[in-house]
Image (tube, rainbow, N blue to C red):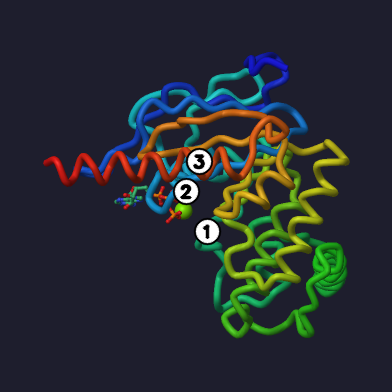
Amino acid sequence: MPETEGDDDVLRVEHVSKRFGAVTALRDINLHLRRGEVLGLLGDNGAGKSTLMKIIAGFQNPDEGRIVVKGEQVSFRDVDHARSLGIDCVYQDLALVNELDVVQNMFLKRELVSRPIPLLARRVMRERTREALERIGINIPRLDVPVARLSGGQRQAIAVARTVTSEADVILLDEPLAAMGAKEGAMILDLVQQLREAGEVSIIMIAHNYVHVLQSCDRVNLIQGGEITFDKPTADTSVEELNEIVVEEYRRARRAAQAG
Ligand SMILES: Nc1ncnc2c1ncn2[C@@H]1O[C@H](COP(=O)(O)OP(=O)(O)OP(=O)(O)O)[C@@H](O)[C@H]1O
Ligand SMILES: [Mg+2]
């Protein structure tokens, strides 16, 4: 099937650039995400992946370019604005509040309120937190401890659970497996697979493992030095092809450095 951008795109990034002082993090990025699709985003350290996610999530503004959400061009005021349009991100650095407990983090900025019985809302939030974590399959014995006391993988599970149980229909996962052991990582990939089969949300997942991306995603984009250099359905590519592109880029950069 040819790769055309069409009306079923829930998200389009058009000609986006971003600089930090002398560093050009993104240059003329064009990316699209179809309804129900899982898009894998690969790229070396510093390639610009997280910067791109932060721009799509309303956390940072692009210097140039446009974001189109469900057909409407938007200029995000902040993260809440993007969230109100259905876009939510699990950040690489997580954005949990260390001092708050598991339940409070799960419902951060979307607390349930039940006056006149606040305790009832707390009980409901607690049950929903338990359900969401069970759905991922991560066991966190106590939900009333500050998340600072949890392991990196447990914290990551909470961040993922929070986002997939939110109202969001465009979900950005920035290295969701990074702090996970093999078993927990497999659970997160299973969850992505369930969401993919249900087809109700669209996902961009950043990962470093080619095999995970080829298994879990419909399509893969590669970002190199702030530019998208590769865009193919996962069915039409392989670990070898992706590896060859990345290694070739490294060799080219090395030759250029030696020549210079
Ligand atoms: N807030 C910032 N201020 C200055 N430079 C930044 C900032 N955020 C990112 N950069 C720079 O922009 C470039 C892209 O960073 P980014 O975090 O997007 O990379 P990445 O692809 O997510 O890498 P990794 O795989 O290591 O997470 C890097 O050179 C980084 O140093
Ligand atoms: Mg990153």
Pointer 1 and pointer 2: residues touching (CB < 8 Å)?
Answer: yes
Q: Is residue 138 above or below residue 36?
A: below
Q: Residue at x 81, y 63 (%)?
A: 136
Question: Residue 254 placed where, x, y %?
Answer: 26, 46
Question: Residue 24 placed where, x, y %?
Answer: 28, 38
Q: Nearer the viewer, residue 86 or 231?
A: 231
User: Crowding at label 2, few (<14), some or many (≥20) Cα neighbours within 10 Å?
Assistant: many
**Sequence order check, earlier mark of 1 and 3:** 3
Alpha carbon distance from label 2 to label 3: 12 Å
Q: Nearer the viewer, residue 185 or 250?
A: 250
Question: Residue 59 placed where, x, y %?
Answer: 47, 45
Q: Residue at x 86, y 63 (%)?
A: 135
Q: Residue at x 79, y 84 (%)?
A: 141
Which label number is shown at residue 58? 3
Alpha carbon distance from label 1 to label 2: 7 Å
User: Crowding at label 1, few (<14), some or many (≥20) Cα neighbours within 10 Å?
Assistant: some
Q: Secondary structure at mark 2?
A: helix
Q: Nearer the viewer, residue 177 or 133?
A: 177
Does the beta carbon of the residue at mark 1 sit less than 8 Å from ligand 2?
yes
Q: Nearer the viewer, residue 239 or 61?
A: 239
Can you identify the residue that label 1 sits on? Answer: 92
Can you identify the residue that label 2 sits on? Answer: 50
Name which residue type carries label 3: Gly
Question: Residue 127 placed where, x, y %?
Answer: 87, 70
Q: Residue at x 58, y 38 (%)?
A: 82
